[in-house]
Amino acid sequence: MHPSSRLPWALAGIVTGAAGVATSYAVAMVLTIRESPVVAVAELVIRLTPGALAEQAIDLVGQLDKPLLVLGTLLVLLALSAWAGIMARTSWVRPQLVWLGLAAVGTVAVLVQRGAGAVDVIPVLVGLATWVALLPALTAPLRMAEAHPELESRERRVFLMVAGVLGLAAIGVGVAGRVVGAGRRHVVESRRLLRLDDVTLPNPPRGVSTGVEGVSPWQTPNDDFYLIHTAISVPAIEPKDWRLRIHGMVDRELVLTYDDLIARGLTESWITLGCVSNEVGGGLIGNAWWSGVRIADLLAEAGVRGDADCVLQTSEDGWDCATPLSAMTDDRGALLAVAMNGRPLPIEHGFPVRSIVPGLYGYVSATKWVVDYEVTRFADVSAFWTQRGWSELGPVKIASRIDVPRSGADVDPGSLRIGGLAWKQHTGIEAVEVALDGGAWQRVELAEVPSEDTWVQWTGTIDVEPGDHTLRVRAIGRDGDVQTGAIADVVPDGATGWHSVDFRVRDA
């Protein structure tokens, strides 16, 4: 490895860049700052990404989108660090400009986060100081070798030893920071020990299951409930630190603590939530037993003014959505939820408090880690997803899904038991129909439901002969709405079309 080649200089830059990332991450963990600078930059990329492009990325890589984005951010940073190392061979100033540019991007990314202050910039400054101080120290042996060729072998060993020690030290600093930064773990422990006396966990009501093996459970376990949010590092909030401010077009501003909220008494109900990004037949939907306080009661206490038509909800991480005021104040039972399936909310699902509004897609209603309600007008606000091309109101569309048989299944000839789910939250399902191989629609049986705000399981039996077949399904709402077969993308207000599966019947 000759010192005049680019490789050792690039390696010096990469080690320096990694060390700066490690020290900034460690400081962020020690200060219990929610986001390290790298994560903040990745979340800034999410905020700046056009909605259509974001949807394509989710379709392409699914739930790997955020880890891949963080990895990509790190790779770009290391590539720029390598470039800085190469430039250090001929210039002292140019590498510093690279470090200053990276620090500037990190500072902007950190400061645009909701509630960010001067302390949040400290990890960026520590990383910058590491870069500025470390690169000259790493490249000193390389300079010595170039100035004195007879010392090349010795200086090469010195460089490799220093680079190796610093690389290991960077890893150790990052690990130590994570160990010391116990803020999130403390929140996990607080959640584990939290007791909510009014929260119950009933068994699913009688008759809600058809008993068909392979159909998704009527009650979705917390661990299986779909997760969609823009946060890479989810907020970790102690219940004692949580506050909700209700302000804007109200007669009286309210600021509620967690204890204030719980003291008002809890309402509980089964509610199905769905994501606007759910494709026809997709799994971005789930049903759970939610416990919380009615939002309508809180807004009534604040005194909403007559010309308001929406509530701008804001999360601790800065994500926001504008929810129709009517959906939060009518009889549908919109909740500030504190528990899910009889336990305090999982951190990833919004602990300690999130919003639940039946009948609306989550992107206009289901704010996790909610901390702010501004009563306002749609004309005066622009929310996260609506400014990226999604529609303003977001009512859930009627939909249905075939779970049995699965697409590509091989089945025996004769009578075939089929089953799946249908939903139109806050309206309910009147009937479900299936059609085999393009034939006539025939109605199937519906299970029971406790309210119009949950999905319903359906089942039926069809006769099938050997060969290839296609089964499709459609639902009919209690308002007479018949699910359309017209195919539409999830943007701007949810996918449409009939779910169909192709299966093969074996020879008798």
Image (cartoon, rainbow, N blue to C red):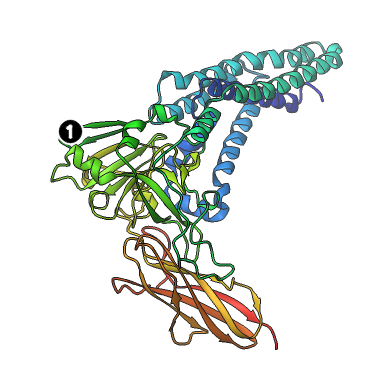
Q: Is residue 120 left or right of residue 356?
A: right
Which residue type carries mark 1?
Arg
Instruction: Say which quadrant the C terminus sits in.
Output: bottom right
The 10 Å Cα crowd at callout 1, few under 14, some 14 to 19, many 20 or more, is some
Residue at the image position 45 percent from the left and 38 percent from the top: 351
Give the residue at mark 1.
252
Q: Is residue 306 left or right of residue 27?
A: left
Can you see residue 43? yes
Residue at the image position 34 percent from the left and 49 percent from the top: 365
Is 414 rendered above or below residue 296? below
Q: Where does the image place residue 156, in percent across and percent down from the top left? A: 82, 18
Query: 356 or 98: nearer the eye?
Result: 356
Q: Is residue 130 left or right of residue 143?
A: left
Is 324 rendered above or below residue 412? above
Can you see residue 249? no
Q: Where does the image place residue 16, in percent across and percent down from the top left? A: 65, 22
Residue at the image position 57 percent from the left and 16 percent from the top: 93
Q: Where does the image place residue 102, in percent across and percent down from the top left? A: 53, 26
Instruction: Say which quadrant the N terminus sits in.
Output: top right
Query: 109 or 119: nearer the eye?
Result: 119
Name the residue at the left extreme: 306
Is 250 rendered above or below residue 37? below
Secondary structure found at label 1? loop
Residue at the image position 44 percent from the left and 29 percent from the top: 238
Query: 439 or 241: nearer the eye?
Result: 241
Image mark count: 1
Q: Where does the image place residue 477, in percent across and percent down from the top left? A: 34, 71
